[in-house]
């Protein structure tokens, strides 16, 4: 009974986790392009050389520090929400999220080998990767059902409704 009640919570948590993973995967190449466009490649090389001289524990500090300047941006977003500047708040929060994930992906790319030398960090990293796979596995049947409904392959009421809407839209477009 309790498991059935918690199922929507776990699916929601898995979806949030997968959105974060998707952002990570898709922002890393964008950050790489920005690094190639702006002379960050030299900075990345310089940072890699400095990190090679650091211990894994000091590398953890290098990994954690870029997140600190983003905290005031989140506070600005909360202030904007509290003062009902909805659009500005959403822009600031989304921008902060993208910048945070992008910078973290960039720094993690540079510090990964050193960080994975620490057993506890490696265990956490492997746990997160396992959770990512589990979240994808949990959400996959739902994604498949949504795809089937959108294609109209299913025989459920929602699929029939979507087919009806598609036919209606087609008839409206043909009438124009």
Image: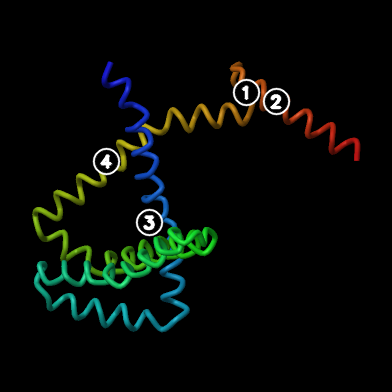
In primary-sequence order, the first of circles 3 and 4 is 3
Q: In the rendering, at what x and y percent does residue 10 appear?
A: 32, 33
For label 3, the residue is 24
In primary-sequence order, the first of circles 2 and 3 is 3
For residue 28, which numbered disc appears in the image?
A: none
| Pointers 2 and 1 in contact (C-beta within 8 Å) | yes
For residue 159, which numbered disc appears in the image?
A: 1
Looking at the image, residue 117 lies above or below residue 174: below
**Residue at position x 59%, y 17% from top?**
156
For label 2, the residue is 163
Secondary structure at numbered mark 2? helix
Secondary structure at numbered mark 3? helix
Between the residue at mark 3 and the residue at mark 1, the CA separation in whole angstroms equals 33 Å
**Residue at position x 91%, y 41% from top?**
176
In primary-sequence order, the first of circles 4 and 1 is 4
Looking at the image, residue 81 lies above or below residue 58: above
In primary-sequence order, the first of circles 4 and 2 is 4
| Pointers 3 and 1 in contact (C-beta within 8 Å) | no
Q: In the rendering, at what x and y percent does residue 30 appear?
A: 46, 66
Between the residue at mark 2 and the residue at mark 3, the CA separation in whole angstroms equals 35 Å
Between the residue at mark 2 and the residue at mark 1, the CA separation in whole angstroms equals 6 Å
Towards the viewer: 85 or 175: 85
The quarter of the picture where residue 169 lies is: top right
For label 4, the residue is 131
Between the residue at mark 4 and the residue at mark 1, the CA separation in whole angstroms equals 31 Å
**10 Å neighbourhood of mark 4: few (<14), some, or many (≥20)?**
some
């Amino acid at each position: 009974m309790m498991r059935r009640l918690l199922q929507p919570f776990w699916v929601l948590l898995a979806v949030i986790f997968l959105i974060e993973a998707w952002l990570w995967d898709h922002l890393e190449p964008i950050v790489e392009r920005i690094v190639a466009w702006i002379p960050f490649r030299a900075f990345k090389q310089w940072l890699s050389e400095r990190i090679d001289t650091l211990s894994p524990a000091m590398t953890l500090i290098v990994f954690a520090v870029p997140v600190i300047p983003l905290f005031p941006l989140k506070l600005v977003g909360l202030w904007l929400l509290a003062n009902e500047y909805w659009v500005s708040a959403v822009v600031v929060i989304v921008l902060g999220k993208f910048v945070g994930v992008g910078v973290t992906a960039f720094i993690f790319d540079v510090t990964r080998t050193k960080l994975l030398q620490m057993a506890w960090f490696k265990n956490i990293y492997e746990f997160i990767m396992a959770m990512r796979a589990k979240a994808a596995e949990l959400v996959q049947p739902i994604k498949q059902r949504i795809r089937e409904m959108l294609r109209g392959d299913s025989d459920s009421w929602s699929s029939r409704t979507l087919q009806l809407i598609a036919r209606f839209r087609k008839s409206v477009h043909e009438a124009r």
